[in-house]
Image: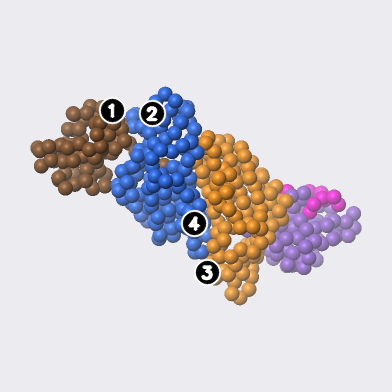
Chain colours: A orange, B blue, C brown, D purple
Amino acid sequence: MTRHLTITDQPIDVAAALAAVQTEAAGAVNAFVGTVRNQSGGRAVRRLHYESYDSMALTQLGHVVAQAHEKWPMLQAVAVVHRKGTLALGDVAVVVAVATPHRAESFAACQYIIDTLKQVVTIWKREEYEDGTEWVAAHP
Amino acid sequence: MTRHLTITDQPIDVAAALAAVQTEAAGAVNAFVGTVRNQSGGRAVRRLHYESYDSMALTQLGHVVAQAHEKWPMLQAVAVVHRKGTLALGDVAVVVAVATPHRAESFAACQYIIDTLKQVVTIWKREEYEDGTEWVAAHP
Amino acid sequence: MSLTIALYGITRDIVGAATIELPAPAPTTVGELLAEMRRQYPALGELRSCAVAVNQEYAPTDQPLHPVDEIALIPPVAGG
Amino acid sequence: MSLTIALYGITRDIVGAATIELPAPAPTTVGELLAEMRRQYPALGELRSCAVAVNQEYAPTDQPLHPVDEIALIPPVAGG
């Protein structure tokens, strides 16, 4: 299985992430692209800041991808790119792309990776509103 | 909901399909990309030919997308591009991209659309092997 | 009345043409059309399925046919 | 022994620094570290959760700490 795991402060090239997983052996590619929404919990968002503990984020991301490969041994390629720094509305925050020989597994593996990434990968989001900022999910 | 439904004999621009569904209101984009595999049922594939009954294919695709919108009213944008004509190994045959405000629905709606497309959209696939060709799924 | 039937994929190969004209007296329903086509081209009966589309919609066997209809045989699809 | 703790996200805001040094005698386990940090910075106790990472892995409360360890407080993550 090939893996491309990146955390970057540069704009994400979604097409490059997709191209990185495509092979002639895997007919199915599923990709999830998370972009910056203009609202969050009913509040208007102006922009976002992502902070990352890079080395741990990549370590944990490696675990997540390894777990996905255990669950779906047919997984042939995975690319995950997460942005950090300041993002504007509409900017791509994360891309997860996976390639498998068959369709259903591409959806399942991609969803597993993004869902688990959100639980364990050490990246923090601070939303900026008209009247202040907030670390997302920090408080109950 | 915005819809972009296309059947084309030109190479598919995956990035354009993704860009077509991205908005500041929908934070989640899921995309399925089907490419030409180098094997099918254990036989080595050399290339593919897709034939389409275009007008009916687009009519049926419209129904599929409308059904998806009924099931997931939060669906904000859908793009489906299907290639026809002769395709080489690795070529993109189909892209389905959907945008929703929330993540889980983007996976579910995208999977529904590609799964249903395969059942009802009037496109036929002829695989070319070393020793002949075959209309896929034609015979029991 | 006569009917014109469009043929796609393997049905075009079986019939050897992209359309076939059924002269009067032509079948009056989808079911009759399928029976007539299978009589003329027995290989159609060997397909996994063969539906009929009328005006770009899948049609039930009791649907009546009219000369103005856009009619097509739909062998098993395999898009995606 | 002393420990250096890296701080991210809201924990950096609460402590007011990107790292904090705990001089000897420093906590010897993850559980002791969390208790000590919460004693010094009660606002940490108001978070939805606060984990401790040792050498880039989530660590259980009974895990021992050593001066060479890469230690960090991990407030609720929100990537993706």
What residue appears at the point 48 percent right and 54 percent down from the top-left corner? B16
Q: Which mark is residue B19?
A: 4
Q: Nearer the viewer, residue C35 or B45?
A: B45
Q: Amino acid at mark 3?
A: Gly
Contact check, label 4 and label 3, Cβ < 8 Å: no
Q: What's the magenta bit mostly, secondary-structure-wise?
A: loop
Q: Mark on residue A42?
A: 3
Do marks 1 and 3 both belong to one polypeptide chain? Answer: no
Q: Against A132, is B132 above or below? A: above
Three-letter amino acid code at the position of disc 4: Ala
Q: Earlier in the sequence, mark 4 or mark 2?
A: 4
Q: Which mark is residue C46?
A: 1
Q: Can you give x and y, in whole percent of width and height, for residue D31 in the image?
A: 78, 54
Q: Which residue is mark 2?
A: B133
Residue A15 percent coordinates (x, y): 54, 50
Work out how far the residue at label 1 is from the one at label 3, CA to CA, in angstroms: 58 Å
Q: Nearer the viewer, mark 2 or mark 1?
A: 2
Q: Secondary structure at mark 1?
A: helix
* Gap in angstroms between the C-alphas marked 4 and 2: 36 Å
Q: Are marks 4 and 2 in contact (CB under 8 Å)?
A: no
Tag 4 subunit: B
Quadrant assignment, res C44: top left
Amino acid found under the numbered disc labelled 1:
Glu
Using the rendered image, report if marks 4 and 1 lie on a common chain. Answer: no
